[in-house]
Amino acid sequence: SDKQRKDVRVWCDGCYDMVHFGHANSLRQAKALGDKVIVGIHTDEEITKHKGPPVFTEEERVKMVKGIKWVDEVVLGAPYVTTLKVLDQNNCDFCVHGDDITMTAEGVDTYHLVKSANRYKEVKRTAGVSTTDLVGRMLLLTRNHFRQGSAEYDIEKEGSSNMGQESAAKSRGPVVVSSCRLPKRSYSSVMAKSPNPGDKIVYVAGAFDLFHVGHLDFLEKAKKLGDYLIVGLHTDPVVNSYKGSNYPIMNLHERVLSVLACKFVNEVVIGAPYCVTEELLEHFKIDVVCHGRTPIALENGKIDPYAVPKTRAIFELIDSGNEMTTERIVERIISHRLEY
Ligand code: CTP
Ligand code: C5P
């Protein structure tokens, strides 16, 4: 007698080039339709045949999808037109895709085979994000994405040296109060589950703009320093004050969604102060603070944001072993621009 229920295995496939929270959201919905999510990823060769070369290599694309918390298995070399054979080979019951039509270079619906076999389900495509849209933001140096959120993130209100948070961010004049010296404040954070008693809590902070393989390798190492990983995300004005130009490419809201989809992350602080204060360390009961090998900008050109954890000897530098940066992605896009 076989009373054990068999796992429902769900197949998702695609290019997953420049992985964003729209991809993650489709995989989250796929997970809700079954028990296991198996993601088939097209090779660089297959993508080049159908729509021109991808921005990211197949190794990078596989790594990014493996980092998403709703993904159970990743298979490289999925056929562009989903076959019943590939579903069967991977013991998948059905295939899930967003509710947009995708075609081969010849104009064939890539899901026609699984649709006629009744092994196809649709999920809602996430509005407002796509690779094309992100590439546009990078090439055109637009700042409109800042204005989609609340006025709090409107960069035009900011003084260029402002590393402040809400109260400072709303003032128009020169910034007089440094976030390091602000009085007690409250924090907005999102978490999947709260830490267990005795958990060693690790804290990192940054922009995490265009969440990429460098971030992923960094967060994997940071997570290994403890049991529970909290990621603080700086507001858009703060990121713009140390990155300049039209950074961040993704607004705070979008960066929160991307970081939350990462399997190493337990909690995200929305709009974390630039300086890691005593108050923040107490509030989140932080045991270790770390940063990667990228440069650390000083607040107002003077104050080390990690001065407090350094004094307490709970600060660690991590080598992610990965050279990817947000700026490098933008360079890649610009050098590929003729292909878009
Ligand atoms: N997807 C989604 N919402 C988005 C973008 C993609 O739900 N905003 C889904 C697609 O519907 C598909 C999966 O993510 O089920 C992987 O698709 P992929 O081929 O990588 O994505 P594209 O449709 O090419 O998306 P993009 O243009 O953003 O690369
Ligand atoms: O630049 P950003 O603020 O997004 O970086 C967030 C964190 O990820 C920082 O601690 C940075 O040093 C780290 N990082 C890394 N390796 C990379 C890219 C970022 O360790 N390739």
Image (cartoon, helix red, strand yellow):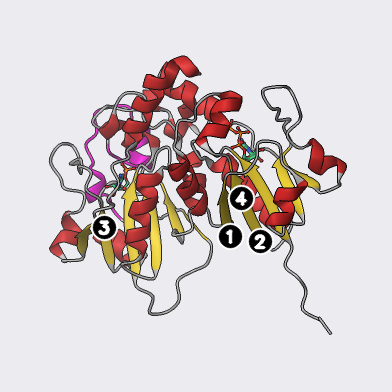
Indicate the amino acid at tag 3. Answer: Cys
Q: In front: 222, or 187?
A: 222
Indicate the amino acid at tag 1. Answer: Asp
Residue interval drawn in magenta: 163-183
Which of disc 2 and disc 1 is earlier in sequence?
A: 2
Q: Name the spot of residue 252 as percent of width and height, x first.
A: 45, 39
Q: Is residue 333 left or right of residue 301?
A: right
Residue under pointer 4: 39
Q: Are marks 3 and 1 in contact (CB under 8 Å)?
A: no
Name the mark on residue 187.
none
Please rate how many residues cluster around mark 3, counting C-alpha atoms within 10 Å: few if below 14, some from 14 to 19, many from 20.
many
Instruction: Report how far apart the C-alphas of labels 2 and 4 lie in the structure.
Output: 10 Å
Residue at (51% x, 40% y) in the render:
19
Instruction: Report how far apart the C-alphas of labels 3 and 2 lie in the structure.
Output: 33 Å
Furthest toward the top, the residue is 338
- The CB of the residue at mark 3 lies under 8 Å from ligand 2: yes
Instruction: Report how far apart the C-alphas of labels 3 and 1 lie in the structure.
Output: 28 Å
| Quadrant holding the N terminus | bottom right
For label 4, the SS is strand
Q: Name the spot of residue 316 as percent of width and height, x first.
A: 21, 60
Residue under pointer 2: 36
Q: Name the spot of residue 177 as percent of width and height, x first.
A: 23, 41
- The CB of the residue at mark 2 lies under 8 Å from ligand 1: no
Q: Is residue 169 magenta?
A: yes
Residue under pointer 1: 72
Indicate the amino acid at tag 2. Answer: Lys
Q: Name the spot of residue 248 as percent of width and height, x first.
A: 38, 32
> In the picture, residue 156 is in which quadrant?
top left
From the image, give the main secondary structure of the stretch colored magenta. loop
Depth check, mark 3 against mark 1: the one in front is 1
